[in-house]
């Protein structure tokens, strides 16, 4: 695994499911990244959201994107556009989101591949105890496809995206931990079918249900797979201490600061 920055702090928001805005976590990442670039600590942010549909910037350019977003929202799925790379991803309580945030001057930092390799290595190490082999590489038919799709036995369970600031970086991963991966993939396919008007020649992901599975399905982590996986991540970063000593030392941005960034992201990416 590429080396994590020393003294990385853990921000565990696995149980903070009551916040009303799905962009809150992305805005918090943005502010923590600014701090890291100004000499603040590197951070591992672990979070979930009860139900939201997160789009990439290219998704909103599809010809019937507004109709597809209206369909999602009429079915109880708030829609946001994130400010990092990637394509459409549904979030729910069975999806664990990881953000690794560090200054660009971190020891050993070597750009794009360092960031992605570090996240890949961390997730692979967290799943060593399952006996499953985690592979990287594009999974055909998966949603939010990329060269750093993470899979087990050919089925994707994780996607990775990145956002760079001048002096710091955020590397983000969504991990499908619990429930049905194929049901989520079919849901994303339904979004694209509406947003594209059924035209598969527009360059958007052509999603296939069998491409995706959860860690509960693939790795035998059981119905509490989200917490088992998050716990393994925290143990690695904290050296087996669970991160308790590190969390207390992290001074978080004020809520109004975060909400200002939320408004900025929404105004820029979802018009």
Image (cartoon, rainbow, N blue to C red):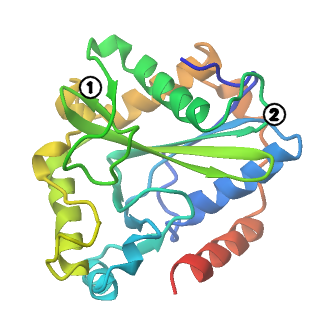
- Residue sitting at x 40%, y 77%: 60
Q: Which mark is residue 105?
A: 2
User: Residue 118 at x, y = what percent?
Assistant: 56, 27
Q: Is residue 7 above or below residue 163?
A: above
What is the C-alpha distance between the residues marked 2 and 1? 36 Å
The residue furthest left is 210
- Residue sitting at x 44%, y 65%: 56
Q: Which mark is residue 253?
A: none
User: Residue 75 at x, y = what percent?
Assistant: 24, 78
Disc 2 packing (10 Å; few <14; some 14–19; many ≥20): some
Mark closest to the chain's N terminus, 2 or 1: 2
- Residue sitting at x 20%, y 71%: 201
39 vs 260, left or right, is: right
Do the numbered discs 2 and 1 sit on residues whose CB atoms are within 8 Å?
no
Disc 1 packing (10 Å; few <14; some 14–19; many ≥20): some
267 and 2: which is toward the camera: 2
**Would you say residue 176 is visible in this rendering?**
no
The residue furthest front is 201
Can you tell which quarter of the image residue 128 is in?
top left
215 vs 78, left or right, is: left
Secondary-structure class at tag 1? loop
Number of marks:
2
User: Residue 86 at x, y = what percent?
Assistant: 44, 56
**Would you say residue 264 is visible in this rendering?**
yes
Can you tell which quarter of the image residue 268 is in?
bottom right
Q: Which residue is mark 1?
A: 221
Front disc: 2 or 1: 2
Can you tell which quarter of the image residue 219 is in?
top left
213 vs 165, left or right, is: left
């Amino acid at each position: 695994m590429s080396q994590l920055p020393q003294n990385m702090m853990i921000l565990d928001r696995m149980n903070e499911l009551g916040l009303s805005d799905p962009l809150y976590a992305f805005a918090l990442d943005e502010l923590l990244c600014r701090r890291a670039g100004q000499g603040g600590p590197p951070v591992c942010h672990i979070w979930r959201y009860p139900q939201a549909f997160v789009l990439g910037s290219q998704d909103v350019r599809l010809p019937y994107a507004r109709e597809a977003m209206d369909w999602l929202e009429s079915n109880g799925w708030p829609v946001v556009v994130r400010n990092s790379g990637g394509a459409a991803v549904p979030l729910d309580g069975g999806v664990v989101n990881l953000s690794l945030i560090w200054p660009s001057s971190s020891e050993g930092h070597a750009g794009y591949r360092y960031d992605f390799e570090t996240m890949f290595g961390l997730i692979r190490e967290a799943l060593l105890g399952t006996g499953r082999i985690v592979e990287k590489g594009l999974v055909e038919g998966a949603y939010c496809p990329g060269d750093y799709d993470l899979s087990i036995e050919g089925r994707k369970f994780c996607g990775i995206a990145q956002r760079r600031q001048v002096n710091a970086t955020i590397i983000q991963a969504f991990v499908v931990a619990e429930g049905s991966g194929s049901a989520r993939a079919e849901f994303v396919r339904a979004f694209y079918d509406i947003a594209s008007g059924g035209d598969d020649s527009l360059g958007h992901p052509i999603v296939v249900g069998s491409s995706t599975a959860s860690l509960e399905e693939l790795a035998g982590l059981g119905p509490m797979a989200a917490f088992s996986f998050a716990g393994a991540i925290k143990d690695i970063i904290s050296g087996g201490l669970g991160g308790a000593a590190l969390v207390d030392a992290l001074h978080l941005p004020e809520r109004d600061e975060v909400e200002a960034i939320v408004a900025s992201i929404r105004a820029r990416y979802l018009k």
